[in-house]
Amino acid sequence: MLSMTELLEILEGNRKLTIRTIEAFPEDELFTFTAVESMRPYSEMVQEVLGIETGYVRGIATSVWDWQPDQFDVQSKADLLAACHSVRNQTIELWEKITEERLALVESDPFFGPPTSHFSRLLYCLENEIHHRGQGFVYLRALGIEPPMFFER
């Protein structure tokens, strides 16, 4: 129902909103603020999002499955923004290798277990980003900062 181009545009629109969410954070709160003790700072959530995207897109495109949760050396807001752009550039480079037939393929998930389609993996990447960005919105509001407008991509 979606073309590969349309799917990439959806991923891109969401990443732009995630980047604007990162930009809204004060530098120190990006790396330290949590709403409750059991939650992580937004910077850690974003690094998870980037790691899963890297692992899944590379795996879907090349059948090389490698996810390293701590793969980014992020020490500042600028580093995190650079990582966002770098991961998305890698995704765009690999995108041409991903076919609709490849997306329909169902295989065991090398990271989380049960068999699923590669298309479902990409949807998981998108849902994970949206979920964590929602947490970032809550953090921003708790800090007295208006989050970016959701509809502006």
Image: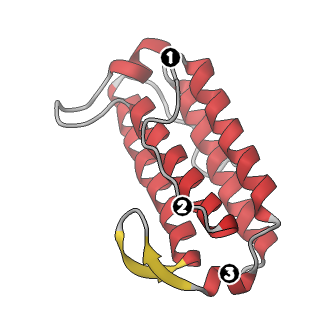
Mark 1 or mark 2: name the one nearer the start of the chain.
2
Residue at the extreme front: 64
Q: What amino acid type should be assigned to the residue bearing mark 1? A: Gln
Q: Is residue 101 above or below residue 52?
A: below
- In depth, the one of 88 and 62 nearer the eye is 62
By what rule are the colours in the image chosen? secondary structure
Q: Please name the residue that numbered disc 3 is placed on.
A: 102
Cα gap from disc 2 to disc 3, whole angstroms: 15 Å
Residue that appears at 40% across and 62% down: 111
Q: Is residue 11 left or right of residue 130?
A: right
Mark 2 or mark 3: name the one nearer the start of the chain.
2
Q: What amino acid type should be assigned to the residue bearing mark 3? A: Arg
Provide residue 14's location: percent of width, then percent of height. Answer: 62, 52
Q: What element carries label 1?
A: loop
Mark nearest the camera among 1 and 2 is 2
Mark 1 or mark 3: name the one nearer the start of the chain.
1
Cα gap from disc 1 to disc 2, whole angstroms: 26 Å
Q: Can residue 1 be seen in this view?
A: no
The reply to whether dot 1 and dot 2 touch (C-beta < 8 Å) is no
Residue that appears at 81% across and 69% down: 5
Label 1 neighbour load within 10 Å: few <14, some 14-19, many 20+? few
User: Residue 75: which numbered mark, if any?
Assistant: 1
Residue at the extreme top: 28
Q: Is residue 109 visible?
A: yes
The reply to whether dot 2 and dot 3 touch (C-beta < 8 Å) is no
Q: Please name the residue that numbered disc 2 is placed on.
A: 65
Label 3 neighbour load within 10 Å: few <14, some 14-19, many 20+? some
Q: Is residue 143 left or right of residue 5?
A: left
User: Residue 106: which numbered mark, if any?
Assistant: none
